[in-house]
Structure formats: structure tokens, C-alpha cells
Amino acid sequence: MVWSRVMTQTERPESLTFFSGLATGLAGLALTCLLTLLHPHTAAFAPITPPVLALFAATALFGGLGSLCFFRALRLLPAAGVAQFHYTQLVTGALVAYLFFAERLTLSMLTGALIIVAAGIWTATTARSA
């Protein structure tokens, strides 16, 4: 996150979003090609249907918009201020895990989440007072 903050001082958020998406896409393509070469006869590969293609497009759209917002926020705020919003991933991750994989929260997951949130609140309050 700190390196992204440094980059936003000289680069536009749009170019950072584009090139990070391009790098991620190329890495995914390379891994797909590698898996295809290593396991050419596996049944894990299936044709891309229109609903799956729509999910890919939605993932790209929302991922790009999220990255754009992230880089714009880093340009305007200190990294400590932006980092606090990453804690929403705990809630959305738990919700997605429950809705799509029927995974229930455990005591260790809740304890870990509480520790992370408490550390974030402590960091935010000490950064604000400094």
C-alpha cells in the first residue's frame, strides 16, 4: 500500500489501474496456459458459457472500479486512512463464503477478525492524535 501511495504522486490513477489489471490478466493467462500444458486431458476445463462470461465481465468491471477508487483515495489521503477501509473485506469475505460456500463463522475466525479490527481502530486513533 505504501508503494502504491508513492506511485500515485507521479502517476495517474487510471494508468495505475490499467497496468495493474493488465499485469493480473497476463499472469492469469500464463498460469492458464501452464496448467493446460501440464494437464492437457483434465476435465477441469470447460467451455466459457455466456453466464460465466458475464461473471468475468462483472469481476473485471468491479475490480477495475475498485482499483481506480483505491488509487484515487491514496492520492488524496495518507495510507493509514485508506487502510482502514480494507477491513470491509472481512465482512464481504464472510458474507460471500456463507452465501456461495455455506461456510459458517467459527470462533477462531471471529477472534481473528476482532483482533484485526481492534488493531485498525487503535492505529486510526493513534494516527489521528499524532
Image (tube, rainbow, N blue to C red):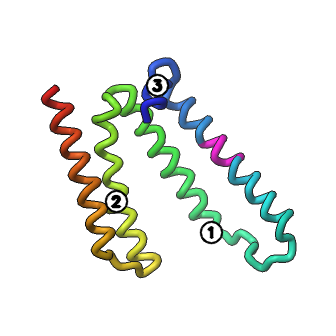
| Prevailing SS of the magenta stretch | helix
What is the CA distance from the residue labelled 3 to the residue labelled 1?
Answer: 34 Å
> Can you tell which mark lies on residue 8?
3
Vertical arrangement, residue 82 with respect to residue 40, above or below: above
> Can you tell which mark lies on residue 90?
2
Q: Which residues are magenta?
A: 21-26
Quarter holding residue 36: bottom right
Q: For numbered disc 1, what is the local secondary structure?
A: helix
- For the point 50% across and 25% down, the residue is 7
x%, y% of residue 71?
A: 44, 34
Vertical arrangement, residue 11 with respect to residue 19, above or below: above
Q: Earlier in the sequence, mark 2 or mark 3?
A: 3
Tags 3 and 1 in contact by the CB under 8 Å rule? no
Rendered-image quadrant of the C terminus: top left
Q: Residues within 10 Å of mark 1 (few under 14, many from 20)?
A: few
- For the point 48% across and 51% down, the residue is 62
